[in-house]
Amino acid sequence: MDLKYTRKNVYKEADGKELEAIYAYAEGYKQFLNCAKTERDAARVAEKLAIEKGYKPFSFGEKLQAGDRRYFINRHKNVFLINVGTENVEENGIRIMVAHVDSPRLDLKPNPVYEDSGLCYFKTHYYGGIKKYQWTTIPLALHGVVMLPGGKSVEVNVGEDESDPVFYITDVLPHLGGEQASKTMANGISGESLNAVIGGLPAVGDEEEKEAVKSAILKLLNKKYGLTEVDFQCSELCLVPAGKARDVGFDSSLIMSYGHDDKVCAYPEMTAIFDSQSSPHTIISVFADKEEVGSDGTTGAQCQIIGDVIDTIARSLGANPIAVRYNSKCISADVTAGFDPEFASVYEKRNSTYIHCGAAISKYTGARGKSGSNDANAEFMGWIRDILDADGVYWQTGELGAIDAGGGGTVAKFIANLGIDTVDVGVPVLSMHAPYELISKADVYALYKACLAFCK
Ligand code: MN
Ligand code: MN
């Protein structure tokens, strides 16, 4: 019997067969990353996969029964996948997994288009916590939707195909960067200077016209999408890093990509619910929106709608919704800050999670003395530990950085506030919220196994 606890490196423990499974799972995950960059993209992918797996649309009025498989896409951005199980839902509750599918990015302002000095630009308003200087001089792609008058919507996706143009935010050259370099990193690039170049070709024969480049760009957009400038005011368009997820290292043991936070948890919970068809439990897998800006609104995890879906399932099965919630259990599947030896001073190394060491459990998150954290109780931590150990899942625990170094939160508290035992289980990420983040293939696979164990 081991009296001392030692964190295990999955890659050191795994045999050849397991290593093969880890690398194979990563291929599916990379495909998901490449087509699920925004919450709308992720919802579209989830809906398509759910239909392929035989899931039917959910409605609030319907009568469910054991064996039913349902999907509900709330306002194009918030996904619920539902497996109705055979066991008594009032006594056993529902197994709930919640990840978020929004990631930090640059949203377009309502009046985004302007021209200056021969270039046409989009003005942006950043979404979520970013280090602004990281978003200059990288290829950006435009994703989203524009509403035309009369209710017609147009999907926009430019910059992901190899033959597409991309968009670009400039930075000052080092030769003239003295003034910028004397500022703090937080102030070196301002929010109002995150303006992306979208064109430079003036409209022909319009030499006298002011803003000839802007005119030409609007003509192009009108031809391609049927939109006029005012339609941007009824749009959700955002710039995200262009390009695909890539393996990192000679051994390809890691993946760099935009949006690991939190697709690295959304993908495992989705694949786990799909792969848990024989489970007796009633299971819900949720993709939440708006986590990066506080989980508010009709598609965020603070929205009543999560409770409404649970209550609808409960009532439709003839169960008391209050008892169902009380007996339910939730994994808040979100990333945490993996220990980065290059920035060791902001971590406490005995209570950090480490890359390659498996699913990362955070009993609590928060800042300034656990403030704003649900702090899972010891009994629930013990329950989680037992189900993971029973299935040989690699897991570890840690805090998000050293005390008073900063902090962060997840959707865990919003689910816990419904009266549901909840704990954060995710994946350690390096360079979190950067345009391209880094994770270990071993850890995303470990989280998949953890979700499978939770659904079993
Ligand atoms: Mn997150
Ligand atoms: Mn985040």
Image (tube, rainbow, N blue to C red):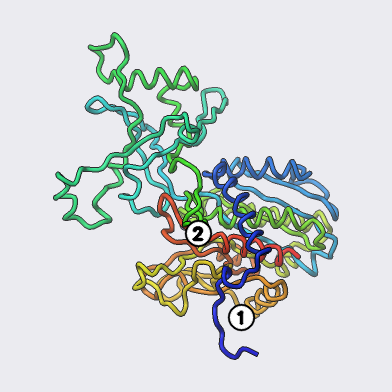
- Identify the residue at image location x=61%, y=80%: 378
Can see residue 375?
A: no
Q: Amino acid at mark 2?
A: Ile
Front disc: 2 or 1: 2
- Identify the residue at image location x=84%, y=53%: 67
- Label 1: how many Cα within 10 Å (few below 14, some 14–19, many 20+): few
Q: Is disc 2 placed on a helix, strand or loop?
A: strand
Residue 249: image location, x then y, percent: 47, 57
Residue 9: image location, x then y, percent: 55, 72
Report the front residue among 392 and 398: 392
Report the front residue among 410 and 110: 410
Q: Which mark is residue 354?
A: none
Q: Is disc 1 placed on a helix, strand or loop?
A: helix
Judge left or right: residue 452 versus residue 109.
right
Judge left or right: residue 248 versus residue 381.
left
- Sequence-first disc among 2 and 1: 1
Which residue is the site of mark 2? 439
Residue 20: image location, x then y, percent: 65, 59
Q: Where the C terminus falls, by quadrant?
A: bottom right
In the displayed structure, 162 sits above or below 375; it is above
Q: Amino acid at mark 1?
A: Ala
Decide if ligand 1 comes within 8 Å of the CB at mark 1.
no
Decide if ligand 1 comes within 8 Å of the CB at mark 2.
no
Can see residue 367?
A: yes
Report the front residue among 247 and 410: 247
In the displayed structure, 80 sits above or below 283; it is above
In the displayed structure, 164 sits above or below 453; it is above
Which residue is the site of mark 1? 378
Asked where in the image residue 196 lies, by quadrant, the reply is top left
Q: Residue furthest top?
A: 205
